[in-house]
Image (cartoon, rainbow, N blue to C red):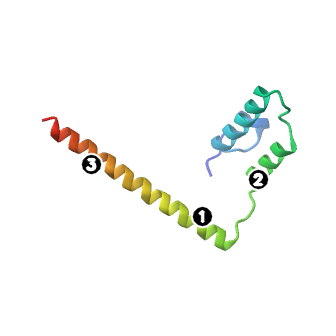
């Protein structure tokens, strides 16, 4: 897992850059709306980030399948983008 320097994260916790960003966004959003940010919801978010709940085997497999499908779709779209750009380059000549 990609961890940042704990001294540079929220309360020095060992968070990934994405987790730290999510926490900072939550605090910013709550502060902007004038509501307390140090809430049980924040504590639950931090708990889940630091000690994620275990996925059941079937949930883990479904997540793996979904991620594989998303990766394949992204690769297909990237291939289409490359083909479209290549076609534009040939038309410009």
Alpha carbons under labels 2 and 1: distance apart: 17 Å
Q: Residue furthest bottom?
A: 58
- Which residue is farthest left? 93
Callout 3 environment at 10 Å: few (<14), some (14 to 19), or many (20+)? few
Residue occupying image coordinates x 69% and y 40%? 22
Q: Are marks 2 and 1 in contact (CB under 8 Å)?
A: no
Query: Disc 2 versus disc 3: distance between alpha carbons?
Result: 42 Å
Residue 24 in the image: state x and y as whole percent. Answer: 72, 34
Q: Give the CA separation, mark 3 to mark 1.
A: 30 Å
Sequence-first disc among 2 and 1 = 2
Q: Nearer the viewer, residue 52 or 88?
A: 88
- Residue drawn at x 48%, y 62% as measured from the top left: 69
In the displayed structure, 56 sits above or below 14; it is below
Which residue position is annotated with label 1? 63
Question: Residue 10 at x, y = what percent?
Answer: 75, 36
Q: How many marks?
A: 3
Q: Could you tell whether 75 is left or right of 25 in the image?
A: left
**Element on which disc 2 rests:** helix
Q: Quadrant of the C terminus?
A: top left
Residue 34 image point, x, y percent? 82, 27
Nearer to me, 36 or 52: 36
**SS label for mark 1:** helix
């Amino acid at each position: 897992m990609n961890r940042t320097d704990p001294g540079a994260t929220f309360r020095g916790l060992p968070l990934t850059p994405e987790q730290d960003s999510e926490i900072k966004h939550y605090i910013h959003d709550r502060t902007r709306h004038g509501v307390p940010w140090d809430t049980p919801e924040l504590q639950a978010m931090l708990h889940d980030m630091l000690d994620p709940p275990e996925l059941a085997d079937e949930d883990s497999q479904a997540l793996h399948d979904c991620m594989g499908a998303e990766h394949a779709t992204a690769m297909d779209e990237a291939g289409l983008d490359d083909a479209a750009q290549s076609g534009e380059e040939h038309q410009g000549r």
